[in-house]
């Protein structure tokens, strides 16, 4: 997201062009009757301004017309018939009504403006399979309009303000409408804009663009709702929208490579689609806009898409495809994306960056940060999808992702990263079957201070799968070390966790206060290839609530690793399988033993694990089932397990397992009551080994195979008859 930060830094140097364009002086031709050109009175003359203030004019086949400028006003209209060509610099609807129809070739050098001033109303129709409208830069600039502060010498005299150049403005200070194509039968038509396309530019403007067919190519930015808070709309029925970024690609001196490009507000960040406020902090910002995508394609791979860039923006996609470098809802404004059909493919995405963002998915497929073979595009372990991101010392960002259908396939995902993030996955109808598939890690409550994350999944056909990233998930040096197995016992930096669900992450030094919650209900399905961690680092507080459904863990379960973690199970099934052991892509959380091979896969740790000594973990179980290869309560820290119902099955159970090893202190307490059933199937129960252990049974059933061992450390076992064994600490 470094591009976002750069944009804010550069915005201070942006010069806004916030005035209506001044039409060229009118010539003697004030058309009132119209007719065919050439031939009729008032036809355009090459090199002179042409003003139409009434009547209808048709430019006939086989002729080329090159007036210096065109203004259509007073209810007048101009039509370019098949086989004709018009070259000009045009305003359609300057202060009143004007209409333009292109059925052939229209070449604009400078700007094409529809609805220029307040009271202006301009409409543009383009049809025909080979029809082309080109809007190019005027060489050497497009004139000036007033003065402005010199950005290179703010305290010096003001300098002339340049007009924007190579732009299509639909609704500048008035009302503008652009209609491209009619059906798939004329899909060969083209609109090529060298500079910016702005819809609803000034506060008094309002614009709409309908793309029925054909190709729209923009070299600058495309903004839907710049300063205007009116109903500014881009409706794409079909066809292609391509933002090339060619207008302002940056050179070595950080200046646009094209010398004649002047954007409607910010010429540095071209190639972006901005919906609801333009790409800058002045002159084209704060507006409202809506984009409807029914079909066709959008390609902004030269840059990205910002919905709610600086105002209020909405994107409604029911079909078609979107390909972009990044997609953001709520950059500095309020942005909403509604996906009911079609596909999106993005390198990265943020819902709520420095503003408020919402993503609502009821259908379609969304892919973020993945190559075609399923590997990560970002191999450093960075987040592909962030919901509630922190930007630029701005504490206002918040994001919510609501999923009721469709599919989401993403690389590393963070819900709440320095801000508040929420993910809601539910199934209102069986046919919708929402699927979330994360390659890498899913983090709920991230590493940055102030992170607050929540994830809820409900519904019989709701699936959440957290998979290993093929080839690993990067190595940033924050996941501890392991012994290389040599006589020197060298410590090797451990790769980033992979395939993990982390609830409340924080930082290893405890400098970040974060929280995360995860709720699972209504027979939903959560499958995690690696570890599940609740409360990873100090000052991280996490909770997992399981009412029904199933949670399958290939690695280990950590409740209160170095932070505070609670796991509340009233139903459903938890299965800690250990199938991750030996997988070359598995990178566990915390330190490991020789060669990093034994990572505790298959074990449920409640209160500390390798590499931690400050965690507090609590597992409360009133129903459901828990199956694990082993259970460590208070392994290196403080852990409690309270079972009043349900069935626990494990090969061994230890309380206070590693309190004295590596200088750590630990306390592990297990309470069995009610109708709870505890089955230890292999190596028995260890109450206090190197640390302090306690076991209290006031009800339920404790079936032990392998013996009951009460350790040398202060330990206590109280059975259901109240008999005490050992000594409390």
Image: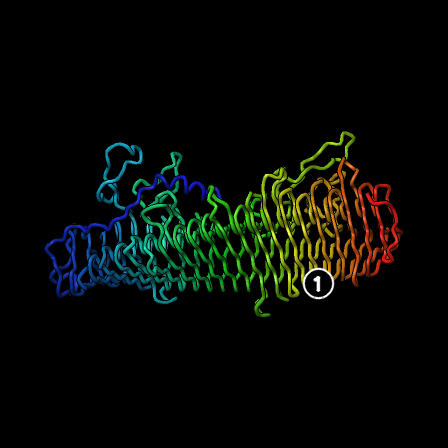
Foreground pick, 169 / 427: 427
Residue shown at the point (51%, 50%) measured from the top left = 388
In the displayed structure, 573 sits above or below 390; it is: below
* Residue that lies at the very extreme toward the top in this rendered image: 488
Q: Residue 148: x and y, percent?
A: 25, 40
Q: How is the image coloured?
A: rainbow
Write down the residue under mark 1.
Answer: 571
Q: Position of residue 212 (x, y in %)?
A: 37, 64
Left or right of 56: which side holds 125? right
Residue 611 vs residue 398: left or right? Answer: right
Q: Is residue 527 visible?
A: yes
Say which quadrant the C terminus sits in. top right
Residue located farthest toward the front when viewing the structure as drawn:
722
Q: Name the element at disc 1.
A: loop
Label 1, residues with CA under 10 Å away: few <14, some 14-19, many ≥20: many
Of residue 400 and residue 9, the one placed in the foreground of this image is: 400
- Along the horizontal axis of the image, is 136 left or right of 626? left
Q: Position of residue 341 (x, y in %)?
A: 49, 64
Q: Residue at x 72, y 46 (%)?
A: 607
Task: Report whether residue 187 is seen.
Answer: no
Residue 409, image x, y percentages = 57, 56
Quarter holding residue 56 = bottom left
Q: How many marks?
A: 1
Give the left or right position of residue 514, taking residue 350 as reference. Answer: right
């Amino acid at each position: 997201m470094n591009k976002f930060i750069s944009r804010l830094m550069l915005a201070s140097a942006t010069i806004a062009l916030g005035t209506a364009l001044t039409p060229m002086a009118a010539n003697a031709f004030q058309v009132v009757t119209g007719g065919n050109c050439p031939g009729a009175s008032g036809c355009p003359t090459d090199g002179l301004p042409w003003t139409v203030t009434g009547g209808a004019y048709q430019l006939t086949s086989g002729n080329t017309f090159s007036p210096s400028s065109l203004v259509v006003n007073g209810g007048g209209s101009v039509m370019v018939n098949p086989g004709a060509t018009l070259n000009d610099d045009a305003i359609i609807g300057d202060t009143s009504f004007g209409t333009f129809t292109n059925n052939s070739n229209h070449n604009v050098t400078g700007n094409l403006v529809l609805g220029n001033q307040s009271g202006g109303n301009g409409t543009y129709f383009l049809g025909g399979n080979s029809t082309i409208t080109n809007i190019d830069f005027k060489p050497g600039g497009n004139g000036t309009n007033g003065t402005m502060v010199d950005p290179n010498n703010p305290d010096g005299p003001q300098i002339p303000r340049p007009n924007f150049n190579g732009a299509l403005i639909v609704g500048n200070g008035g009302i503008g409408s652009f209609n491209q194509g009619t059906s798939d039968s004329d899909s060969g038509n083209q609109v090529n804009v060298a500079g910016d396309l702005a819809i609803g530019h000034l506060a008094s403007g309002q614009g709409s663009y309908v793309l029925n067919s054909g190709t729209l190519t923009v070299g600058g930015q495309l903004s839907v709702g710049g300063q205007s808070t009116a109903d500014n709309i881009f409706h794409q029925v079909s066809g292609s929208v391509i933002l090339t970024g060619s207008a302002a690609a940056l050179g070595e001196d950080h200046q646009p490579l094209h010398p004649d490009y002047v954007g409607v507000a910010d010429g540095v960040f071209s190639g972006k689609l901005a919906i609801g406020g333009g790409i800058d902090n002045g002159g084209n910002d704060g507006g409202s806009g809506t984009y409807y995508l029914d079909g066709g394609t959008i390609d902004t791979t030269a840059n990205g898409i910002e919905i709610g860039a600086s105002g209020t923006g909405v994107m409604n996609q029911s079909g078609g495809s979107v390909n972009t470098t990044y997609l953001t809802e709520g950059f500095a404004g309020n942005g909403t994306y509604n996906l009911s059909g079609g596909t999106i493919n993005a390198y990265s995405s943020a819902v709520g960056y420095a503003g408020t963002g919402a993503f609502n998915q009821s259908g379609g497929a969304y892919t973020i940060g993945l190559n075609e073979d399923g590997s990560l595009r970002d191999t450093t372990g960075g987040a592909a999808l962030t919901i509630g991101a922190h930007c630029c010392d701005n504490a206002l960002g918040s994001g919510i992702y609501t999923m009721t259908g469709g599919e989401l396939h993403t690389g590393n995902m963070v819900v709440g990263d320095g801000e508040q993030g929420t993910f809601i996955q539910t199934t209102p109808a069986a046919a919708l079957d929402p699927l979330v598939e994360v390659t890498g890690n899913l983090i709920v409550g991230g590493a940055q201070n102030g992170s607050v994350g929540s994830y809820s999944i409900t519904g019989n056909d709701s699936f959440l799968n957290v998979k290993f990233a093929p080839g690993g998930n990067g190595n940033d040096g924050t996941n501890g070390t392991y012994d290389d197995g040599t006589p020197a016992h060298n410590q090797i930096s451990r790769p980033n966790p992979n395939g993990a669900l982390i609830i409340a992450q924080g930082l290893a030094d405890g400098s970040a206060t974060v929280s995360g919650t995860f709720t699972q209900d209504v027979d939903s399905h959560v499958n995690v290839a690696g570890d599940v961690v609740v409360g990873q680092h100090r000052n991280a507080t996490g909770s997992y609530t399981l009412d029904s459904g199933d949670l399958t863990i290939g690695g280990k379960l950590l409740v209160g690793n170095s932070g505070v973690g609670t796991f509340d199970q009233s139903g459903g099934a938890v299965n800690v399988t250990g199938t991750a052991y030996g997988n070359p892509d598995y990178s566990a959380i915390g330190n490991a033993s020789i060669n990093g091979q034994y990572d505790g896969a298959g074990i449920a740790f409640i209160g500390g694990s390798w590499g931690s000594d400050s965690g507090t973990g609590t597992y409360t179980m009133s129903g459901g089932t828990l199956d694990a290869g082993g259970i460590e309560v208070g392994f290196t820290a403080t852990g409690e397990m309270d079972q009043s119902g349900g069935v626990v099955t494990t090969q061994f159970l230890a309380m206070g397992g590693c309190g004295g090893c590596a200088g750590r202190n630990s306390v592990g307490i297990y309470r069995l009551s009610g109708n709870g059933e505890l089955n230890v199937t292999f190596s028995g129960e260890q109450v206090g080994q190197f640390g302090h252990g306690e076991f209290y049974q006031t009800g339920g059933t404790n079936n032990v195979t392998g013996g009951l061992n009460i350790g040398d450390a202060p330990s206590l076992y109280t059975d259901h008859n109240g008999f005490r064994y050992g000594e409390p600490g």
